[in-house]
Amino acid sequence: MKRIILAAIVAMFAMTSCSTYNGMVTKEEAVKTAWSNVELQYQRRADLIPNLVATVKGYASHEESTLKAVVDARAKATSVNVSIDDLNEETLAAYQKAQSSVTSALGRLIAVSENYPDLKANQNFLELQAQLEGTENRITVARKEFNEATQAYNIAIRKFPANLIAMIFSFKQKPYFASDEGASQAPKVEF
């Protein structure tokens, strides 16, 4: 009788462990998928930038330094690749810093366009500007969804007794996207 009870306990533990492990794998895959969606949206933005720069260049050729800053920021951002397997606080911060420089450069480019009424009325420019705005919104949504998937995963691997399974199978916490430095202060707008 003791053997039957012991076998039942071992079987119950094994089933619970398998279920817990499978749940962690599912949540980790959700984090990977969410990360891919973040990268996809940043790539979409990087793909739009050459068209925007070419359109602006036709109207504002003497704004070469601003155009060069956008192109350089894009090149730097696309050179920073982070695999989900290498994702940690430092690599995520480097990735986020590179992407922030693109956002900043694009902001300066849009501000420059204010000086060119013909450019502001150009259909190509308006379409590209709308595409970039939509992409920035998609990036925000993708980052939010990544943080939500990361939170669900991190909670799952920290709860007891799942944390024991996580420790055995080396499931590690994933970092979150954080606000850009200085994001808590409103930007200064001057006319």
Image (tube, rainbow, N blue to C red):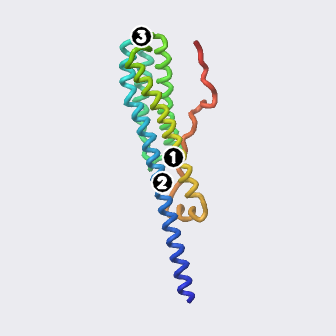
Q: Residue at x 50, y 38 (%)?
A: 141
Relative image position of residue 166 (x, y in whole percent)? 53, 61
Q: Quadrant of the N terminus?
A: bottom right
Relative image position of residue 57 (x, y in whole percent)? 38, 15
**Residue annotated with mark 2:** 28
In 3D space, how far apart are the residues under numbered discs 2 and 1 (Cα atoms)?
14 Å
Q: Residue at x 48, y 36 (%)?
A: 139
Which mark lies nearer to you, 2 or 3?
3
Which mark lies nearer to you, 1 or 3?
3
Marks 2/1 in contact by CB < 8 Å: the verdict is no
Q: Mark 2: which amino acid?
A: Glu
Q: Quadrant of the C terminus?
A: top right
Crowd band around label 3 with a 10 angstrom C-alpha radius: few (<14), some (14–19), many (20+): few
Task: Give left or right: position of 179 versus 54.
Answer: right
The numbered mark at residue 168 is none
Q: Residue at x 56, y 49 (%)?
A: 151
